[in-house]
Amino acid sequence: MTMTTALLAEQVLNGIQFGIMLFLMAAGLTLVFGVMGLINLAHGSLFMIGAFAAAAVAGATGSFAIALVAALAAAAAAGALMEILVLRRLYTRDHLDQVLATFALILIFSEGTRAVFGSFPLFLNIPDALSGTIILPGGIQYSLYRLSLIGIGLLVAFGLYLLITKTRLGIQVRAGENDREMIAALGVDISKLYTIVFALGAALAGLAGALVGAIQSVQVGMGEPVLILAFVVIVIGGIGSIKGAFVGSILVGLTDTLGGIFLPMFFDVFMDKSAAASAGSALASMSIYILMAVVLIVRPSGLFGART
Amino acid sequence: MRLKVTAIAAVLMAASGISAAEGLKVGMITTLSGGGAGLGIDVRDGFMLAISQSGLTDIDVVIEDDQRKPEIAVQLADKMIQSEKVDVLTGIIFSNLAMAVIPSSLAQGKFYLSPNAGPSQLAGKGCHEDYFNVAWQNDTLHEAAGAHANETGYKNSFILAPNYPAGKDALTGYKRQYSGELAGELFTKLGQTDYASEIAQIRASGADSVFFFLPGGMGISFLKQYADSDIGLPVVGPAFSFDQGILQAVGDAAMGVKNTSQWNKDLDNPTNAAFVESFSSEYGRLPSLYASQGFDTANLLISAMASADVSDKDAFREALRAADFNSTRGQFTFANNQHPIQDIYVREVVLEGDVYTNKTLGVALENHSDAYAVECGL
Amino acid sequence: MKRESLINLILLGLLVGFPVWAMFSDEPFFITLATKAAILAIAGVGLNLVIGQGGLVSFGHASFFGLGGYSMGILASHAQTYEPLVLGPLVIDGSQSMPIIWLVAMGVSAVAALLIGALSLRTSGVYFIMITLAFGQMFYYFTISWSAYGGEDGLSIYVRNTFPGLNTLDPIQFFMIVFVLLLLVLGFCARLRGSSFGLALNAARQSSERVKTVGIEPFRIQLAAFVLSGMITGLAGALFADLNRFVSPSMFSWQISGEIMVFVIMGGVARLCGPVVGAMLFIVLEHVLGGLSEFWHIYLGFLLLLIVLFARGGIVGLLAGREKAHE
């Protein structure tokens, strides 16, 4: 298959779009880890809750905008609840206890969702205003919705940047990352701060779930593959670093997308077509894990992680 | 979870002169939780509907959830055989689980009736006298899609499937019938949810049609994204991405797509009409092809029970092979490898009221038997 | 420590007593369950070595579990078809003999653990968790598309492999083989704890700086522990494949790594028999709750939460009380 410049540009755009969706997931995860030191495996459940809430509300109201708000609210509420009832008891525990507890939460959320919504996937579609394609400069025909996803993702990233660097909450968050005792000594209500940070991360995951749910399948278990990818992202970027999460997301998005295209083409040079497609796609599915291993071998704390 | 009714049966059986023995025990291992649960639930519900309609009371069905994990399925098969002491096993949805369970169950002298998976390993040289497939060999619906592509005049197909054995079988099946050129051939990741890159390649390939096999959530994602891409090339695929359980989640994106199936709810025969009617009123939803397969599997079993006792394995096997039951597909016979010989239809996705469903357009392959049957020594 | 030893004895007694009872009451499936618990316990003991004593949280032990499984699957499938396995100039006959399969499984796991460990131990903390996960995922995706050995369908082995002098198809005899191996592995780990190696490993977890000052390189100690741990889990993988007479890529999945970790924590991290009680409880829960409701995972989830929140130190910790400091 020949590769024109326009096609290559479109694929790069696809990689960036995939990366930006990963960023929405990874941002919350890395924030929670950076501030509270908590490993949250149930972050994928919040993604799923966002998608289900959006599908349910869009089905009832017919409005995608209301559905997005509902997804944000539902995921934030679920996140806050999770933090208050369970997770705040685990901040001082080691990572193992956190893994076990949040693994338990995955079981509860997944099967709980199935108990409420049934075993069949739900319907959630792109809003009419954003459906179809537009022609970009260079003659690239590109999905308007995917373009909007890139826009929303960049906006969120910018908003987070402002929040962390310019607001009182951001200062508290950064202080909390460095020294828990100090910030408590400054008179900040640390448990309230943690709940807010957690709910914020959860809302971002819920937003990602709703946005992605419109072009994917809204079903139980949809959060787990994304969760693993989000972990890969934050580890590559350096845990706790929002900037790292952003760079890591784009890297993973591009590697995954472009690997899926170029590796089969590469094998095609010296193999027959079917075998090349199969071998190339096998290596492509391993590519992001290889990327992560290589990054960690070269920089054991990720690209932007604090040196220890 | 089990259905147990035993009283009057013995009396009836004794009165009718058939040796009553101790009835028949069925072990159903199927997927009832997690992402693939919809399929298993449909098979189970179709199966149990037939059992309850038969009025038989000397049949005991033990149902267990395999969670779509092969290790769990193997463990459940051990439980069914060692502890429940079942006579017949059935229920498995996914081929990889089937390959984990079926060979060793057969080796332990159990009958297996497959209501869904039809891996090629069990259809050719590896066929077995106690293994009956009531659904299809895995390649069948893909072959029918290839035949349909020829008939429609597609000359340059772009084909894609996940990179795992069933995906490779799907593309092989399509190519076995399809005689045109290939604009592209892609293997995607198993469980992949974003197809932007594949869709871009389809757009750039100059294809005149697209064939895909992406079961479950993968198909939903692909169809939604494909519809949004405005490519507009005609799509063909096997029924798995267009069954009743999935269609509502795909919505408009599936409208008008041609897909191949051995069954549809509008097939014109009295058994099918009664099945669709009773399934809908019993469970409050339209049946899917999986439900029809579960229903047919149970009726095959019931028909064999009527003429032989399972304790006489040879007689029971002959009774199964005769396939003397009314299928929702109309005509139903077994080939030498004990997989169906059946018509495969082309269907189109349509909207009836506010429900997305399928309409039968015609026959893609008539009296079709699979390509592996010749290798089977039975 | 006295009380914990007594509890360990009772636990092992239960584990061996239950299948014997099942044999006499003609419930062979319960023997199968007990065998599964014992095999998972071996895998857990392997993981516990790095998690508990080494403080290295590996989220990739499915790599070794799967490698052990595939060692068995590949050797046995070649023996089944009488086609030797050709690796470049090397031609290896397949085998259906358990001891040979175990050795190969442990050897392959050791080599893999050496490579994975050498690379992963450059990192620590959460990075270590994730890089070990990455290696597991690489194996998982590789085997899914590796059609020579069945891809996602996996490999079925129709007859259980053999052990000289025993009938391995008899459930209780196979259980006894597994149980003896579990005892051996536990014995090995108990000796290891008291040895200078075990003490150095413990010390390296608590303060790698302090270990360095006495002239021990923590990296080498931890790598050695990682390799031993991988070998034990690899052995469990080979046994697990033999129990099911089947291997598939799902043995490499991150859920398996997670499950092994979950019952190690449930039983009690760093406790000798923590993984044993964890595995037993896990199997019992799966069996009992699985029969109760289609949504049994919800109950399992709540139960795990209760254990984390209120039974620190796991079940063994709950029964035996807080662990005294190592002398």
Image (spheres, coloured by chain):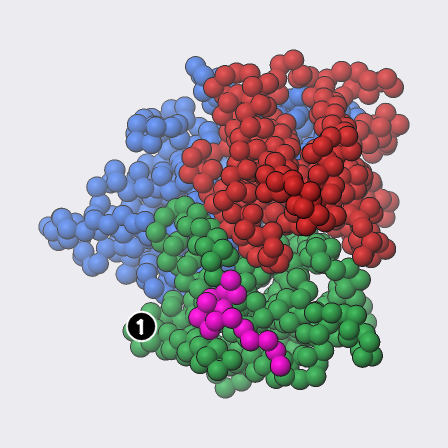
In the image, residue C52 above or below residue B24: below
- The residues colored magenta run C312-327
Relative depth, front residue between C221 and B314: C221
Instruction: Report which quarter residue B194 is drawn in.
Output: top right
- Amino acid beneath label 1: Asp
Residue B187, image x, y percentages: 70, 41
The residue positioned 71% from the left and 39% from the top of the image is A172
Which residue is pictured at 52% across the width and 42% down the height? A84
Whether residue B75 is visible to the viewer of this picture, yes or no, is yes
Residue C85 point in image, percent of width and height: 71, 69
Q: Chain C in the picture: what colour?
A: green
Q: Which residue is mark 1?
A: C26
Are there few (<14), some (14-19), or many (20+) residues within 10 Å of tag 1? few
- Point out the image quarter for the N terminus of chain A: top right
- Chain painted in red in the figure: A
Q: Which chain is blue?
A: B
Q: Quadrant of residue C214?
A: bottom right
Instruction: Report the chain holding disc 1.
Output: C
The image position of residue A297, as x and y in percent, is 82, 57
